[in-house]
Image (cartoon, grey):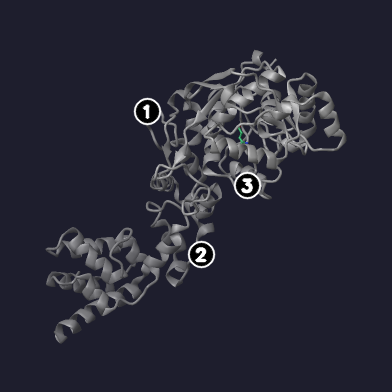
């Protein structure tokens, strides 16, 4: 059946055991891009067989954030296609039937071992330095022993019988040939004692039912693949399915990103709440293990979906570089047109005062070329427009007014600004130019003290805009008070 079709069908198959994570988002994105680059179909399937570990808002977090990132599935439980159900909890009976079929065909067996027995066995093997695999004890039970246990209602799981010393191998799309021998594998449980399929079992059936052609997933699944191949073989599925295991994402110490490291923002929700544009996030995610032939680093999703190819995927660890993320995002703000920028950032800003409320849009726009996420704006607005008094200590500590020349410039600036008829950005800019042309001071030596005296800051966006926004009264008051502090200080020696 499915091996006759050439259509590329990929899937992102999250388990809702936590919030939508950076690693999961990258897996989703790469499957989406690969499907789109090949005119294929991208599927989202919810893998919720691990009922004890599922978290309440796990599914919503995945679905809502995928939507926010504009990684839209062609098929999912919300927009089902012909190959559903797209959520595993609606398919438990299907998996159970397949498990029973394998039992009937003698390809699987009931395992009555208790979790305690299995744990003790595992520990014993580990202490001897052996691979902790199941002893296959129950594989050798007689029919009578099995029937007795069933009569006594002893719970059992179902395990697949692996052939001895058999190789399972595949040509990994990213890593080349990978081989596992069954000597290092355990007979896998396919149906748990609560009659719910295990992850490995359900995945094989779903990938077959959904006619998945390519699986791109995290490298932590490499060791699952031989089990899935064995299950597929036992079920007699003839679908051709290719696997590619993506690079591991590591932090600056070279360790795999751990969800427990709360310092590092790892959930898409975090970035969304901080006010990163979603296009910046998907752009950044693209760079986690994929590089374009032309090495371009800033590009929209639509471009990525045309360019994406497996050849440029790397198998070596990918560093999760938060500074790079900030840089990528700042490029997106720079490129936004003003009205889009304003409507995007406004929801994130809460700081306000009289200066800001008079010219809210302009106050926000001065930081457009500077920010990486919208929540940064609150502290920038406060820093720039809080209009705090400049103290004498600050003036002295700044060491900006030691040169007599700057006093002359400040006095001239004060005079000119006071007599300005129109308080416009242009007039202010011209005034600054004129005052500067009359000063021997250049560049920083001129602008830093002027900025400090007029706005109480040493750094910030274009000075003429800041002077304009702070407003005539306050700027004049600031310069006057700095000048008189300097004079008093000189007098007092
Ligand atoms: N449900 C698995 C996970 O969340 C993914 C399985 C797969 O891609 O095969 O890790």
Residue 424: image quadrant is bottom left
Front residue of 468 and 128: 128
| Circle nearer the N terminus (2, 1) | 1
Q: Callout 2: 10 Å neighbours few (<14), some, many (20+)? A: few
Q: Is residue 275 left or right of residue 416?
A: right
Q: Secondary structure at mark 3?
A: helix
Which of 488/392 is in front?
392
> Is ligand 1 less than 8 Å from the beta carbon at label 3?
no
For residue 426, say whether it is visible: yes
Q: Earlier in the sequence, mark 1 or mark 3?
A: 3
Q: Residues within 10 Å of mark 1 (few under 14, many from 20)?
A: few
Find residue 437 and report its horizontal and vertical position in percent. Answer: 16, 61
Q: Residue furthest bottom?
A: 492
User: Where does label 2 land, which residue?
Assistant: 350
Question: In which quadrant of the rendered image does the N terminus lie?
Answer: top right
The residue mark sitting in front, 2 or 3, is 3
Asked whether mark 1 and ligand 1 are closer than 8 Å, the reply comes as no
């Amino acid at each position: 059946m499915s091996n006759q079709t050439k259509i590329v069908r990929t899937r992102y198959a999250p388990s809702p055991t936590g919030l939508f994570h950076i690693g999961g988002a990258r897996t989703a994105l790469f499957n989406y891009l690969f499907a789109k680059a090949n005119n294929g179909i991208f599927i989202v399937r919810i893998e919720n067989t691990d009922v004890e570990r599922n978290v309440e808002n796990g599914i919503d977090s995945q679905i809502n954030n995928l939507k926010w990132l504009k990684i839209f599935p062609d098929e999912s439980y919300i927009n089902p296609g012909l190959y559903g159900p797209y959520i595993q909890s609606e398919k438990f009976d299907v998996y159970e039937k397949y498990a029973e079929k394998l039992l009937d065909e003698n390809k699987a067996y009931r395992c009555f071992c208790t979790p305690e027995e299995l744990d003790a066995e595992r520990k014993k093997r580990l202490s001897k330095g052996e691979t902790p695999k199941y002893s296959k004890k129950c594989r050798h039970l007689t029919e009578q022993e099995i029937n007795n246990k069933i009569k006594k209602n002893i719970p059992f799981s179902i395990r697949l019988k692996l052939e001895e010393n058999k190789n399972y191998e595949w040509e990994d799309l990213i890593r080349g040939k990978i081989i596992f021998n069954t000597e290092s594998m355990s007979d896998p449980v396919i149906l748990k004692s609560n009659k719910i399929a295990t992850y490995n079992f359900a995945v094989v059936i779903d990938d077959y039912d959904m006619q998945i052609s390519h699986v791109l997933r995290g490298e932590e699944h490499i060791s699952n693949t031989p089990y899935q191949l064995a299950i597929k073989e036992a079920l007699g599925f003839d679908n051709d399915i290719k696997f590619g295991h993506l690079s591991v994402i590591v932090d600056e110490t070279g360790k795999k990103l751990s969800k427990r490291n709360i310092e590092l923002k790892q959930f898409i929700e975090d970035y969304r709440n901080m006010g990163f544009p979603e296009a910046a996030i998907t752009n950044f995610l693209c760079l986690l293990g994929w590089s374009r032939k032309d090495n371009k680093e800033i590009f929209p999703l639509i471009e990525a979906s045309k360019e994406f190819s497996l050849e440029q995927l790397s198998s070596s660890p990918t560093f999760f570089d938060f500074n790079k993320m900030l840089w990528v995002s700042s490029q997106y703000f720079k490129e936004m047109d003003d009205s889009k920028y304003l409507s995007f950032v406004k929801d994130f800003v809460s700081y306000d005062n009289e200066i800001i409320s008079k010219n809210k849009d302009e106050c926000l726009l001065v930081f457009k070329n500077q920010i990486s996420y919208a929540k940064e704006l609150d502290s920038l607005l406060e820093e720039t427009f809080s209009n705090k008094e400049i103290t004498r200590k600050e003036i002295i500590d700044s060491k900006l007014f030691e040169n007599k020349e700057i006093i002359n410039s400040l006095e001239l600036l004060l005079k000119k600004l006071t007599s300005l008829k129109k308080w416009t950005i242009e007039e202010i800019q011209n005034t600054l130019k004129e005052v500067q042309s009359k000063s021997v001071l250049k560049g920083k030596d001129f602008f830093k003290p002027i900025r400090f005296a007029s706005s109480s800051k040493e750094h910030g966006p274009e000075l003429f805009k800041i002077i304009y926004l702070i407003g005539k009264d306050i700027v004049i008051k600031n310069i006057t008070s700095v000048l008189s502090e300097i004079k008093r200080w000189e007098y007092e020696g």
